Image: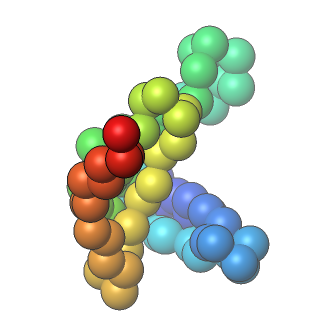
Amino acid sequence: MDTRIEFLDERDSPIAFRGRFAAFTDPDALDMNVLGRDVIALFALIVDRPSEVVCMLGQAHHYQVVQRTTGS
């Protein structure tokens, strides 16, 4: 079945994806929110476990990982 998934960007503007995605129709089927590989494969994915942040970057976005040191 064709599905529409909608996310909000950094400006809270909706971004919609249409396609065939596996889904649970019962919101109580799992005790957590889950996105499958068929969805996350569309993005560069950054998972920051200590900060509990997941960033999904589209093709127009870029990121840079920088190591910072603190002074003694």
Residue occupying image coordinates x 49% and y 70%:
17
Q: Residue at x 70, y 26 (%)?
A: 27
x and y, in percent, of residue 12 in the image? 74, 72
Colour scheme in use: rainbow
The residue nearer to you, when weighing 71 against 64, is 71
Tell me if residue 9 comes above or below residue 48 in the rendering. Answer: below
Quarter holding the C terminus is top left
Asked if one can make out residue 33 in the rendered structure from this viewpoint, the answer is: yes
Image quarter of residue 22: top left
Residues 10 and 42: in front is 10
Q: Position of residue 65 (x, y in %)?
A: 26, 60
Residue projecting furthest to the front:
72
**Residue 11 placement (x, y as % from top left):** 71, 78
Residue 1: where, in percent of width, then height?
Answer: 46, 53
Q: Is residue 43 left or right of residue 19?
A: left
| Relative horizontal placement of residue 46, taking residue 51 as reference (left or right) | left
- Residue at 47 percent of width and 69 percent of height: 18
Residue placed furthest toward the bottom: 60
As displayed, is residue 42 above or below residue 15? Answer: above
Quadrant in the picture for residue 60: bottom left
**Is 5 left, or right, of 42 in this rendering?**
right
Judge whether residue 22 can be spotted in this image: no
Q: On screen, 29 above or below 53?
A: above
| Number of numbered discs on residues | 0
Which residue is at a point 37% across and 46% down the rendered structure image?
Answer: 70
Residue lying farthest to the right in this orientation: 12
